Image: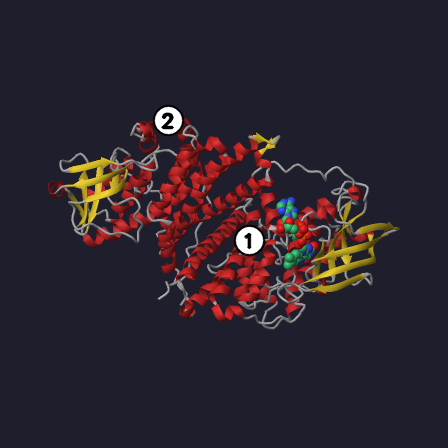
Amino acid sequence: MNPTTEPHQADLLYSEAEEDLRAAVRALLTDRNDPARVAVRAEEGAPYDAGLWKALAADMGVAGLLVPEELGGQGASHREAAVVLEELGRAIAPAPYLTSAVVATEVLLACGTGGSAASSLLGDLASGRRTAALVVPFATGPEALRLPGGTACMVTAVADAATADVLLVPSTAGLYAVERAEAGVDVAPLVPFDLTRPLATVTLTEEAAAAATPLAGAETALAAVRQGLTAGAGLLASEQLGLAEWCLEETVRYTKERHQFNRPVGSFQALKHRMAQLWLEVVSARAAARNAADSLAAGSPDAPLAAALAQAYCARVAVHAAEECVQLHGGIGMTWEHPAHLYLKRAKADSIALGAPGAHRETVGRLAGLPTPA
Amino acid sequence: MTTAADLRARTKELLAAHPPATTERTAFLRARFDAGLAWVHYPVGLGGLDAPRGLQAVVDAELGAAGAPDNDPRRIGIGLGMAAPTILRYGTDEQKRRLLRPLWVGEEVWCQLFSEPGAGSDLAALGTRAVRDGDHWVVDGQKVWTSSAHVARWAILVARTDPDQPKHRGMTYFLCDMTDPGVDVRPLRQITGEAEFNEVFLSGVRIPDSMRLGEVGEGWKVAQTTLMNERVSIGGSRIPREGGMIGTVARTWRERPELRTRDTHQRLLELWVDAEVARLTGERLRQQLVAGHPGPEGSGMKLAFARLNQEISSLEVELLGDEGLLYDDWTLRRPDKVDFTGREAGYRYLRSKGNSIEGGTSEVLLNIVAERVLGLPSEPRTDKDVAWKDLAR
Ligand SMILES: Cc1cc2nc3c(=O)[nH]c(=O)nc-3n(C[C@H](O)[C@H](O)[C@H](O)COP(=O)(O)OP(=O)(O)OC[C@H]3O[C@@H](n4cnc5c(N)ncnc54)[C@H](O)[C@@H]3O)c2cc1C
């Protein structure tokens, strides 16, 4: 048996429309997102800039890329959302895009849009007026999903819960939507390793659980959450790609300018080889990330493998790029002032988010028919 | 512009006029060349149709499906990948007409007389001398690591024509007839036991000036075309998943559960991921070529495949346990083609060591990526403005 003979034949390039979208997002982020401000806001406990989110989500409409037009979205696909994530990663821009516009949106779409509750929520998310967070620990990958026994629960390390308007709460009872501001909902912020992505512990009392809106029954809920996590993992690879790309470009730029021993440090072969190696990894990460985005967009049966593959690969590349960025900047790379640390923290946290590389490799092994030893 | 549909139609015509089942192999290949379907991006009359390179896959797929013979590219890799593009770029009309067809068909095998004992990575240091004698050149020197020299009819050769110039300037590029009595080819045994490459001694070899490629003293410039093509030999067609060495070890894993351990499982999964990503990277490069925007990714692919081949075959030898202690055959043989994947795991492990040396070492390729792709400054150099004859050796 060789279960791997029919891979999805992905279009791995960027279309013209995708390049236009990239240019628009990049221009906005260059204009509105200053990494120095990012660090300051993060320390003040409010990393998200509401103005930036409005410009991005509502004015440009990128929050609704995955949502069909009839539900108020753009009717685009994971390919375009991936491009947005590349740019967000590149600019280390804090925004609840991955959690709300990708994971929560994908979960709601997978619930079936027949129900009016899910549909109207999708319209809200697509317009960028409101955001939602899926209440599972951010480290949870599609395969590791364990749901609590009831909607009244306590879940820790939930990404973007503190800023979300709506919480999507999956349990063995099904999937429910709860307003964050509702009585009996407690969202206690944690100190995140990645300053640009807030985490919180979410606690729901029985009272809040009783007031929750049902979105899907147990079976659909499980599949929908899994689908959301798979899409999240697959597209997170694009954020990691953008992040790694910035780290490489910035490191090349800096080492060309920085002089020691009467020559640019970037002329020393020990450093050149490290940057060349990183370039090869970034180029490869791009192929893996595009493959995941295209497979998800096509709804291919190969998508879970493509997403796991991309995550297993790109997570490592982003961490490597950020680590090299710090090291090759020398002392300045170690400072709070230089943005490199924001990238390092995001890269490291991203590598755990939605399943660590090892977990994704296990998934690849299962789907590629490479069984574990007895 | 030639389209995929045009090529499909032309291929069908070729197959109708020369049914593979009843046509002799060489005759079919010649007909394919004459129909412009050999390498579609080559000019009309020289085996091509001036079509986009990426469309070659269309022709190959049609011919493959019809069971047509191919030109056994592994036997004539140096001709196809290096000699041909250089002749196409710098050759005279006469040279192109005489040489390209038998090269592509495989009637004439080519080898590459570049490396010397004193000039490997630093190819421009080479010392084989070519001295003008009327309308001929007389060549003396020694070349080494010359793959396929024992089966070659022709060689691409770089020799020094002016030792008083700095090393990059005084070289000239020639097309050398390997049947010249002054050419002495001796097998050079390699770590696999066989002798795929050779030492080639050149004593008083006479090359007509009409077999010079490019201007006198321009050998380095001409050689760049050869070297660039050597490094960017990315195929025109999709590589299937598990198409390379990873496929062999994955099959072993599936078929032989008794060999599995936790450690080898982890390493297999890591390499499977890397191999699949490398496949996708190559596929993305191919799509860029088809779209007419070749990316610089090509310069990285050889690096990636060298590492993968080495690590995968290394894992495979270990996975095999007792069998990994054995070797199929150390007999000195002189194979007529280069084969990275044939034979057994131990052979693959040893042969793949060459993948990071031949065609530019991985260290040199990293230098190239750093300088040409990333634009990083070069190391300070002491050899650029000194006459070749005054260099340290
Ligand atoms: C299987 C095989 C087939 C071959 N076939 C042919 C052929 O058909 N025709 C032909 O002409 N040649 C052929 N070669 C030769 C090949 O091109 C050379 O071996 C190669 O270019 C390296 O040169 P070298 O062996 O002299 O090593 P050296 O150049 O002496 O290198 C020794 C070590 O130093 C490193 N090094 C050298 N320069 C630098 C630098 N600037 N920066 C960092 N590290 C450096 C190298 O990476 C290597 O690790 C073949 C080689 C092999 C292994």
Point out which mark residue B215 bears: none
Furthest-right residue in this view: B134
In the image, residue B35 sits, relative to residue A89, either above or below, namely below
Label 1 element class: helix
How far apart, in angstroms, are the residues tagged by discs 2 and 1? 50 Å
**Percent from the top left, x then y, of residue A223?**
26, 53
Amino acid at dot 1? Leu
Q: Is residue B159 above or below residue A365?
A: above
Closer to the camera: disc 2 or disc 1? 2
Same subunit, labels 2 and 1: the answer reads: no
The residue at which mark 1 appears reads as: B55
Q: Is A253 placed left or right of A233 in the picture?
A: right
Dot 1, crowdedness within 10 Å: few (<14), some or many (≥20)?
Answer: many
Amino acid on which disc 2 is placed: Arg
| A252 relative to B336 in the view: left or right | left
Residue that mark 2 sits on: A37
Residue A128 screen position, x and y as percent: 28, 34
Residue B244 visible in rendering? no
Residue drawn at x 63%, y 37% as measured from the top left: B378
